Image (cartoon, rainbow, N blue to C red):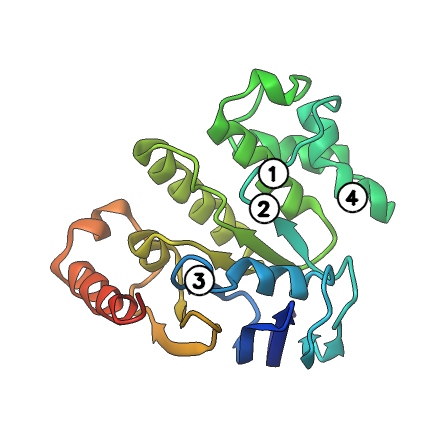
Amino acid sequence: MSQLVVDKITKSFDNKLVLDNISFTVEDGEFVSLLGPSGSGKSTLFHLIGGMYVPDAGEFYLDDEKITGKRGSISYTPQSPSLFPWRSVLKNVLLGAEISGKTDEAQALAMLEKAGLSGYEHAYPHQLSGGMRQRVAFVRSLLSPQSFICLDEPFSALDEFTRLEMQRWLLSIWEANRRSVLFVTHNIEEAIYLSDRIIVLSSNPASVKREFKIPFARPRDESLLLTEEFLQWKKEIYGELRVLQ
């Protein structure tokens, strides 16, 4: 089980209110995306969940345990893959497991194979493409002991075709593992394609504006992106974001 409860979170910096009374829940095995205008505090919320900051008010609960201000409770993948350049691909993906003392090299090699990285186990980050580095970072998240994963715009720096390839790959790996995921993106199509639910945040300060439950069955195929129903969902969510600009 891995349920995250965000309960009435408020946060200010330098007397400027950034997050205002934010509440939502990510259920066990659910894929939830956060959408909102630039500067709406989505990354700040991730930092709070991860214990890097402490909220002014409110609490976070993971499986009914309070984790407010506590580090190491979730696995976090930032926009940049943040791989250690002096460690090989294999050593990078084993980092979280090493820290917890639960290293399983056979499992890591199997996961790298599923990620299409066979033959690169002993390569170094500078030898990989941007998409490959993101795969390494996500495999590291899956191999970390934490059952809840936060992904902060992991595909934002990739070109359109690589991004779609990474989305397909992420879904295939996620389907096999079903970790609970909270995903930040500015891309409406990406949010609809990947998510069970989308939470729209307002800006200045951020609050939960609306939630959308995405009805498309899983597993999902990229042909979904061209359907009329998908386009209608995109229009509705775009309209919600448009009034926030």
Q: Residue at x 36, y 57 (%)?
A: 191
Q: Mark 1 or mark 4, which is nearer to you?
A: 1
User: Horizontal placement of 4 versus 186: left or right?
Assistant: right
User: Horizontal placement of 119 versus 100: left or right?
Assistant: left
Residue 28: percent from the left, percent from the top?
Answer: 57, 70
Using the numbered discs, state the Cα–Cα distance from disc 1 to disc 4 in whole angstroms.
13 Å
Residue wearing tag 3:
33
Q: Residue at x 64, y 36 (%)?
A: 82
Dot 2 or dot 4, earlier in sequence: 2
- The type of residue carrying mark 3 is Ser
Per the image, label 4 sits on a secondary structure element best described as: helix
Using the numbered discs, state the Cα–Cα distance from disc 2 to disc 3 in whole angstroms.
15 Å
Using the numbered discs, state the Cα–Cα distance from disc 2 to disc 1 in whole angstroms.
9 Å
User: Horizontal placement of 117 versus 233: left or right?
Assistant: right
Q: How many numbered circles does the render carry?
A: 4
Residue wearing tag 1:
137
Q: Residue at x 30, y 65 (%)?
A: 245
Per the image, label 1 sits on a secondary structure element best described as: helix
Residue wearing tag 2:
78
Using the numbered discs, state the Cα–Cα distance from disc 3 to disc 1 in whole angstroms.
19 Å
Q: Which mark is residue 28?
A: none
Q: Is residue 104 above or below residue 230?
A: above
**Depth check: 26 or 55 in front?**
55
Q: Is residue 111 visible?
A: yes
- The type of residue carrying mark 1 is Ala
Which corner quadrant of the image does residue 10 belong to? bottom right
Per the image, label 3 sits on a secondary structure element best described as: strand
Dot 2 or dot 3, earlier in sequence: 3
Which corner quadrant of the image does residue 65 belong to? bottom right
**Depth check: 183 or 222 in front?**
183
Using the numbered discs, state the Cα–Cα distance from disc 2 to disc 4 in whole angstroms.
18 Å
